[in-house]
Structures are given as structure tokens and as C-alpha cells.
Image (cartoon, rainbow, N blue to C red):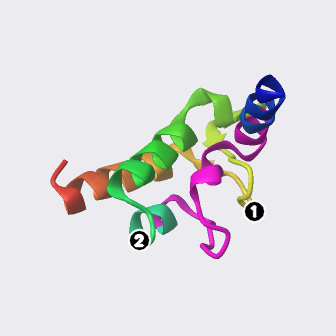
Amino acid sequence: MMDAVLQQIVNDALTKGPTSLVPRHVALRRPIDIVNSRVLSAHDKRAILAAWASDYYAVGSEPSLRKIPGTPEPVTVDEVHSALLELDRRFSI
């Protein structure tokens, strides 16, 4: 029973990706939306952006683009990195 529950949690996390940390009412279109969110902690913001920047979410034929579940279109990895830099600047990380 517990194995089935844990497996479902893992499957949901893989399907939803880092957006599983984002409350449903938060619109997620661009990386800066994560930085500007008032409902996410700095640690959650960093986790989402770091995942978004990873090769796991690279668009197959365009390796400089990233697409995470729940977003309307791919963004450049440079845009994700810029959002990470802005997060660091705002939180003095």
C-alpha cells in the first residue's frame, strides 16, 4: 500500500516537474514570474529555476530552449539564468 502511494507521488513529481511546487493560482509563464512570486520561498524559487535550467527540460531539437510542464511555451536557458541572477541579487545569495 505505502509503495503504491510513494510511486504515485514520484509519478506526479515527474509529470508536473518543478511546477509541483507552484500553487495552482500562480500564473507561470516566464522565469521572472517565479522570481516575482510572493507565495514561494526563496529556496523554492531557486529549486524551480534550477530545474528549469537543467538539460532534463531542454527542447529536443533546440538545446538552448527549456520547457517545463505547465508553461505555455519554451524559454531560452539564458532567460532562466537571468532569473537566477536576479533572484541572487534580490536575496543577496
The reply to whether the magenta stretch includes residue 28 is yes
Q: Are marks 2 and 1 in contact (CB under 8 Å)?
A: no
Q: Residue at x 57, y 53 (%)?
A: 21
10 Å crowding of disc 1: few (<14), some (14-19), many (20+): few
Q: Answer left or right for 8 relative to 54.
A: right
- Residue 31 at x, y = what percent? 51, 58
x, y percentage for residue 79? 48, 53
Q: Quadrant of residue 56?
A: top right
Q: Quadrant of residue 66?
A: top right
Q: Could you tell me the amino acid type at mark 1?
A: Pro
Question: Mark 2 or mark 1, which has the lower sequence index?
Answer: 2
Q: Is residue 79 visible?
A: yes
Magenta range is: 11-32
Question: Image quadrant for the N terminus?
Answer: top right
Q: Secondary structure at mark 2?
A: helix
Task: Let me know if residue 78 appears in the view.
Answer: no
Residue that mark 2 sits on:
36
Residue 57 on the magenta segment: no
- Above or below, 70 against 23 in this view is above
Q: Which mark is residue 22?
A: none
Residue designated by label 1: 72
Q: Is residue 87 above or below residue 58?
A: below
Query: What residue do we see at 43% from left, 51% from top?
Result: 44
**61 or 32: which is nearer to us?**
32
Instruction: Tell me what residue is drawn at x 37 percent, y 59 percent.
Output: 41
Residue 57 left/right relative to 35: right
